[in-house]
Image (spheres, rainbow, N blue to C red):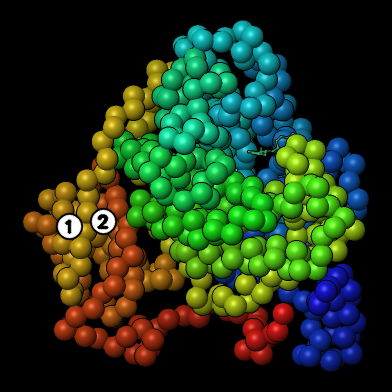
Amino acid sequence: MKNSHYFANVALGAALIGTGITDAFAAEPTIRELAKERGRFIGTILNSEWFNDAIEPEFEEIHKTQFNVVVAENEMKFDATEPVENEFNFVKGDKMVKYAQENKIRVRGHALAWHSQVAGWVSSNYSGQKEKLLAVLKNHIEKVVGHYKGQVAEWDVVNEAINDDYNAGWRSNGSVWYEGIGAEFLDSAFVWAHKADPKAELCYNDYSLEWGLREGSKASFVVEQVKRWKANGIPITCVGTQTHIEIAHETTPQNVRALAKALAELGVTLNITELDIGFPKGEAGKLTAADYAKQGHLYRQFMDVFLEEPNMGEFVIWGLTDAHSWLDEQQGKTEALLYDRQYKPKPAYDSVMASLMAHPATDVVSPYDSKLFIDPQDSTETDSTIAIKAVASPASLSMRVSGRTLFIAGANSAKVEVFDMQGRPVFSGKSEKGSVELKGIAEGIYMVRVRDGSSSLVKRKNIYGKNRVASPSRGSFFHIKKRPSRFSEGTLERNY
Ligand code: XIL
């Protein structure tokens, strides 16, 4: 394997700095350095073994060197944080937050309202009792999100609430929350989480979202719900696609791209939250270099999509080393991660690096720079345990650009903002009587956001027309500030 062990490379780089020969043999960059330059977060879980001090020392060494976002495998789930009613246990979660702060790693919180890994007392005491269950969920969210206020950047507020039917709908069997409360538990959970930490990003997270947007699919159901949530002022900012896939699932990266684009229109980010690309367990021991190369190719395609879609922010893999993965025991899959059982980077690691290097920082939009996609609207704030009523009213705003004129349907007057593809604001104004002239913008592709108070719409638009001013690429109208990059052209052309 080329560029094999990063420890060796770091050591080599460090030794050479001492001799002054740094250019040709500089230390390998790490994934987190490249992610940071691109305004993105790439990470993996802290396995339960880490929390129990039962993991090899290489684990943490690699984890903190290579990654800049983290999530707990099990330790922030309901049964871990509230094992007894209203008695909260934050010991393990606090351990992770401390580790993350010491190492400047972003924290995802996982997960608040989920049908699985709920403490047993919830259903034994309150099954089917709507008001009680609402009070339990509200208290849980307030206490957990409140405890981590300002320290957890993003929560999976609701996890896996959609059923596995061909015609997707809410999971109505086997969910204490749905069975007792109904679909309002989702809307309420978002509102309570937002109240407890107004700055945290709030996600809906699920699996099988990578299977495309056909009618009746989980992904299209999610898009419909996000539309409804946004129209109703429910403060969702992100969707998480878990993406637990197999080596044969070749169409999934492009399906994730399509979902990202659909969510961009709604002003919501898409994060890859639990990626693993497993081989069938029966193939363990028979895997060839070509198999691992194929796995690398799939990882690379996901990373390409991630870096190319402006509303994607986080890329999280559900495990670091094949020595510790939930797949072997629970899913009949194996060898799905970036590092092998001896903590050696696999071709998948090199493929992720190759994708990062092929997408220079200047080409990657950070949804966090512009706050374009993560600006929750003023939401319905309520302190009651009465569920937020779900009202099915699809967003009615739409926009169209003709030359320099932006036409808006569905709002008499609206605030219009235009951002370049680096997320910098280039225009701000108001539409009156359904249109506005986009003055002083160079030809090019932009993100346009329209807001009318109750709803907002973000679209990528090509702005062109007579009123030409110099294009940004020619540099004379406004100066595109290059993000500092540590890489010379030569480094970017590195051959993998
Ligand atoms: C898994 C953990 O990895 C296992 O240790 C645990 O036994 C079961 O849960 N979707 C999710 C994660 O949202 O929380 C799951 O994690 C994997 C599937």
Please name the residue that numbered disc 1 is placed on.
Answer: 408
Q: Are marks 1 and 2 in contact (CB under 8 Å)?
A: yes
Which corner quadrant holds the C terminus?
Answer: bottom right
Mark in front: 1 vs 2: 1
C-alpha separation, residue under disc 1 versus residue under disc 2: 8 Å
Q: Give the secondary structure at mark 1.
A: strand
Regarding residue 442, the answer to whether it shows in the image is yes
Q: Residues within 10 Å of mark 2 (few under 14, many from 20)?
A: many
Could you say which is closer to the camera, residue 256 or residue 84? Answer: 256
- Tell me: 451 left or right of 129: left
* Residue 334 shown left or right of residue 87 in the figure: right
Helix, strand, or loop for circle 2? strand
- Residue 57 versus residue 392 in the image, above or below: below
Q: Is residue 369 above or below residue 215?
A: below
Q: Going 72% across and 35% down the picture, which residue do you hit?
A: 74
Q: Is residue 384 visible?
A: no
From the viewer's perspective, is residue 43 above or below residue 84?
below
Q: Mark 2 belongs to which amino acid?
A: Val
Mark 1: which amino acid? Ile
Quadrant in which the N terminus appears = bottom right
Q: Which residue is mark 2?
A: 450
Q: Measuring 16% from the left and 62% from the top, which residue is drawn there?
A: 407
Residue at position x 47%, y 41% in the image = 218
User: Who is closer to the viewer here, 388 or 309?
Assistant: 309
